[in-house]
Image (cartoon, helix red, strand yellow):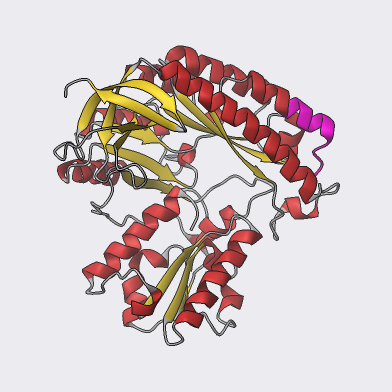
Amino acid sequence: MGCRANQFESAIIEENLTKNGLEKVSKIQDAEIFVLNSCSVTHKSDNEALYLLRSAKHKKPNIINILTGCFAQIEKDKLLEYDFIDYVIGNDEKLNLYNYIKNHTNFCARDLMTLNEFNSVELTDTTKTRASLKIQDGCDNRCTYCIIWKARGKSRSANIDFIINQINNFAQHNFHEVMLTGIHIGQWGKDLGLTLLDLLKEIETRTTIKRYRLGSLNPTEITPEMLEFLKTSEKFCPHFHLSLQSANDKTLKSMNRFYNTKDYLELIETINKTFDLPFLGSDIITGFAGETDEDFEITRKNLEKSGLSQIHTFPYSIRKGTIGESLPNQNSDEVKNKRADIIKAISKHKLEEFINKNIGKTHEIIIEKHRDKHTQNLKGLTENYLSTQIISDREDLYNTPQKVQITEYKNGIIYAKLLNP
């Protein structure tokens, strides 16, 4: 469940178990162990985790249910009280899950605030077309809507040599692209006396990977020096995801975010001028505590005039244990959902605009290892994050970089043609 970091860690869990002789199966009925790597960003996520575990036990009463991830970390003391949960394993311990299964240790979730070092576990997963690499864990921010800092601990950075070796290992396993991910990658290096830009310079010169992408960043973490470097990079994909959360300064202050709307709208404009058709995604929460109709109208206007390509929007969900839970003037679900629908409509329009700007343009894509399951077309992702499809029966192109031209956008599909057929 949950974020890219959790997906990366799930791949580590799977690799840890299969290397120790366990076999992955596709059906609960065939399994002896069910591992759920949970998310806890909202109470809805918690309830979904409980539902999945209860359902697994119902389908196969003698299955061993192992709950790990952020929900396990935050609510660790209560979870073994449920008769459908057999193991509760914390966020750091899960990376060596086999040890706990082998030793029948059904509870281990230490206080992550005491951890000062990144848990450097290698991954060689080759099932996907694009590799992910977690370079950082934890978060030192205390946003009032968020509980994840309690689930992840202090910000901890992987050291440069580990990251470089992992990226080169991916390249040796025929990966052409890697996504740098974490809980708050903009804080990478803070505990090492370095900055994210220091790492990117090392990746540029010391790795053989063809291209890389950056995970979510706060606006303040994208400096003029970073943009100047990325503009000349031969490996960086011009794809940014900005963790904005609101486009109203009063709401941002209430959320304990450390930037203002004027500055990040200027940053978006600068990025669009610096790169040729960069993809600019963002996160926006609607209906946060105290957000009035007037506040939301400011957010709406600012997002409409922004140069964003897409806006990932979700209504505010009160999370127990956060400051946001106790703030006055909570909005109703109806108000939050209505505002989210308005932003989703803006996002849809902006994405269509961005796609249309790319029609006729030349891009490089990495043809994925599997065809699209609905159309059976070849598919791949452009440097600027557009998922494209190619009508072709060729089988020799899987997992290869190819130059393409975007030809049309039809029925929600971006079509491209090979330039070197």
Q: Please state which of residues 345 and 64 is positioned toward the viewer in this rendering.
A: 345
Spot the residue most to the right. 329
- Whether residue 65 appears in magenta in the rendering, the answer is no
Q: Identify the image quadrant of residue 336.
A: top right
Q: Please provide percent x and percent y for residue 314.
A: 64, 44
- Whether residue 297 appears in magenta in the rendering, the answer is yes
Q: Is residue 83 something one can see in this rendering?
A: yes
Q: Please provide percent x and percent y for residue 411.
A: 46, 32
Q: Is residue 199 something one can see in this rendering?
A: no
- For image coordinates 42% across by 81% down, the residue present is 64
- For image coordinates 22% across by 74% down, the residue present is 21
For the C terminus, give its image quadrant: top left
Q: Please provide percent x and percent y for residue 323.
A: 73, 52
Q: Is residue 226 left or right of residue 178?
A: right
Spot the residue most to the top. 273
Q: Give above or below for 404 relative to 216.
A: above
- For image coordinates 29% across by 69% down, the residue present is 24
Q: Please state which of residues 106 and 86 is positioned toward the viewer in this rendering.
A: 86
Q: Please provide percent x and percent y for residue 169.
A: 19, 46
Q: Identify the image quadrant of residue 143.
A: top right
The residue range painted magenta reads 289-299
Q: Does the magenta stretch mainly form a helix, a strand or a loop?
A: helix
Count of all numbered marks drawn on residues in the image: 0
Q: Please state which of residues 380 and 331 is positioned toward the viewer in this rendering.
A: 380
- For image coordinates 46% across by 86% down, the residue present is 61
